[in-house]
């Protein structure tokens, strides 16, 4: 069973008021605290139940038990209709159902603060369609060539600045791309996976991962 | 009329189209669910009075003939169920020469401005914004400093902006856990991804929509920039998966590629699902085919994919598996592929 207000799964306490089932939290937020009191609290003060009953009876006429009957004075939309359909009928509904709308907005977007542009004023944006580089098709690897180009562990970085996403002790992205994976240590492979993933070179990252996995599984990819 | 989606778009091996939608409502009128017919007629007339007729054509939907309805559906201005459109008297559509820009009236909100481009092209936002700004300067739009632009659907209140990329991801779809990982990635950007599928249809086309979600707590600029970062990730991931499949299973991929082309090129009847699956394989292996026997441009692939996805002219939209529909579809595909063979 779920709370009819927030939709959360009901746990140990179910509060039914005016035919609507609430969770403890929502009942509290709706101001129905008195329905939540522990009976033990009442026992400690034998006179309080009578006081509360009298107070509650006096408040009854002021209470809006049927919040679901809240109706927009302009378009006639009820809160129940809004909650069922997720749509409002007019601008005035935003005032009428303000609390519920803000709650829905929070639920869906995690925010209810407006940050966009104002009418008839252009948004300040310089967003451009970014170039996404084409992937280089994989050529059949030439083991000899790869060995010739395999970087040495102490090799100085010679890659351009934008390709120098390197770990502290590991290889640069360029070095990893050119490396014969069989010649890299497990540690270099592990660091390399992170470097490649950070640079969004998923293809390289998966090659490094496969090489490492092959070794751990006892295979010999070298 | 030229068709916006036959233009050569950027990254169109992955991105079929980019769309920007901006919704607005007019003060003084109830929102659509609470707008009576008399008010609705007045709203349609008010909006018609401010539309720039030098740029836009169109009008009330009930005035469209069957051919126009089909064409506007194929051009993605009308919904795919346009032939069964409810209350066409309460809706109007205006569109420019190549149908890349449109203004819908009465479709959910009072105004829906839509700009579309083939491939990956975020300039659609500026195009949609230009039209929205013009309308905002001529009409008294519903706006509050607290909530921004007010809408009937409160999920759109705020900027009223949605950016949508339609993407073909055959390789990620065929990679185990690929879509799940992508869904997680998309969620990190607070966007959403969902398969392109009609109600009751199995989502096996490998085509997905990646759409912005937030309209509050975020500026238009942030939405666009986040979308650009996200789509770049998606394109890279799809290309990497294609590379992985095409190089690790080269023979099988080449075989299915050839078979898929043969099926599309010569089938006398073909189901929507079979056609989309075959197109997925053509897309996946397109850049890796070195036989040179199959000549197929990315544009043709995109056009075929969109034609089948939007397929307005099939004899029966309700039963797309009927013999007549399958025959109609196969004929259309053959005609396009034959043209590409000759070119």
Image (spheres, helix red, strand yellow):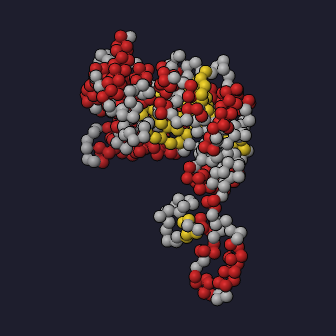
Q: For residue A155, say whether it is visible.
A: no
Q: Is residue B160 left or right of residue B242?
A: right
Task: List the single residue furthest toward the top.
Answer: B342
Q: Residue at x 70, y 26 (%)?
A: B49
**Residue A183, percent from left and from top:** 33, 38
**Residue B108, percent from left and from top:** 58, 39
**Residue A82, percent from left and from top:** 60, 52
The correct choice, above or below, for A108 with respect to A11 in the image is: above
Question: Which of A169/B12 is in front?
Answer: B12
Question: Which of B227/B6 is in front?
Answer: B6
Q: Residue at x 33, y 41 (%)?
A: A211
The correct choice, above or below, for B289 with respect to A70 in the image is: above
Q: Quadrant of residue B133?
A: top right
Q: Residue at x 58, y 82 (%)?
A: A39
Quadrant the C terminus of chain B occupies = top left
**Residue B207, percent from left and from top:** 42, 34
Q: Is residue B13 left or right of residue A145?
A: right
Q: Residue at x 29, y 45 (%)?
A: A215
Task: List the single residue furthest toward the bottom.
Answer: A46
Q: For residue A37, say whether it is visible.
A: yes
Task: List the single residue furthest toward the front.
Answer: B38
């Amino acid at each position: 069973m779920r709370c009819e207000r927030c939709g959360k799964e009901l746990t140990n306490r179910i509060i039914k008021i005016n035919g609507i089932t609430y969770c403890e939290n929502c009942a509290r937020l709706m101001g129905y605290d008195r329905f939540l009191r522990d009976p033990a609290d009442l026992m400690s003060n034998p006179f309080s139940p009578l006081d509360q009953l009298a107070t509650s009876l006096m408040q009854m006429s002021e209470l809006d038990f049927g919040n679901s009957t809240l109706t927009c004075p302009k378009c006639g939309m009820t809160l129940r209709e809004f909650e069922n359909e997720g749509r409002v009928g007019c601008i005035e509904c935003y005032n009428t159902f303000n609390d519920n709308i803000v709650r829905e907005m929070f639920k869906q977007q995690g925010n209810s603060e407006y940050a966009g542009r104002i009418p008839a004023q252009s948004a300040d944006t310089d967003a451009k369609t970014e170039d996404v580089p084409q992937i280089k098709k994989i050529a059949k690897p030439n083991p000899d060539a790869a060995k010739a180009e395999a970087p040495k562990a102490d090799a100085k970085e010679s890659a351009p600045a934008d390709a120098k996403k390197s770990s502290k002790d590991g290889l640069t992205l360029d070095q990893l791309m050119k490396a014969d994976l069989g010649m890299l240590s497990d540690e270099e492979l592990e660091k390399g996976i992170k470097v490649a993933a950070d640079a969004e070179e998923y293809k390289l990252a998966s090659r490094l991962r496969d090489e490492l996995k092959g070794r751990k599984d006892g295979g010999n990819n070298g | 009329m030229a068709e916006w989606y036959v233009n050569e778009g950027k990254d169109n091996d992955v991105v079929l189209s980019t769309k920007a939608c901006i919704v607005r409502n007019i003060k003084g009128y109830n929102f659509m669910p609470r707008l009576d017919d008399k008010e609705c007629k007045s709203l349609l007339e008010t909006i018609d009075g401010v539309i720039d007729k030098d740029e836009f054509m169109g009008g009330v939907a009930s005035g469209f003939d069957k051919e126009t309805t089909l064409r506007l559906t194929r051009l993605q201005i009308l919904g795919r169920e346009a032939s069964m459109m409810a209350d066409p008297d309460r809706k109007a559509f205006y569109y420019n020469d190549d149908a890349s820009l449109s203004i819908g009236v009465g479709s959910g909100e009072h105004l829906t401005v839509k700009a579309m481009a083939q491939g990956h092209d975020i300039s659609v936002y500026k195009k949609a914004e230009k039209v929205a700004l013009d309308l905002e300067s001529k009409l008294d739009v519903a706006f509050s400093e607290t909530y921004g632009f007010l809408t009937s659907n409160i999920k759109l209140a705020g900027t009223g902006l949605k950016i949508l990329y339609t993407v073909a991801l055959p390789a990620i779809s065929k990679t185990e856990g690929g879509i799940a990982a992508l869904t997680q990635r998309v969620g990190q950007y607070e966007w959403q991804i969902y398969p392109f599928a009609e109600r009751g249809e199995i989502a096996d086309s490998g085509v997905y929509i990646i759409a912005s979600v937030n309209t509050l707590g975020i500026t238009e600029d942030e939405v666009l920039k986040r979308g650009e970062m996200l789509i770049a990730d998606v394109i890279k991931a799809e290309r990497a998966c294609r590379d992985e499949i095409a190089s690790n299973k080269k023979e099988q991929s080449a075989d299915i590629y050839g078979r898929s082309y043969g099926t599309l090129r010569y089938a006398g009847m073909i189901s929507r699902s079979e056609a989309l699956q075959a197109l997925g394989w053509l897309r996946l292996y397109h850049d890796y085919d070195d036989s040179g026997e199959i000549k197929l441009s990315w544009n043709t692939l995109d056009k075929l994919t969109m034609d089948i996805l939007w397929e307005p002219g099939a004899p029966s939209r309700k039963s797309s598996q009927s013999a007549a529909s399958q025959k109609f579809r196969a004929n259309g595909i053959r005609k396009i592929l034959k043209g590409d063979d000759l070119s």
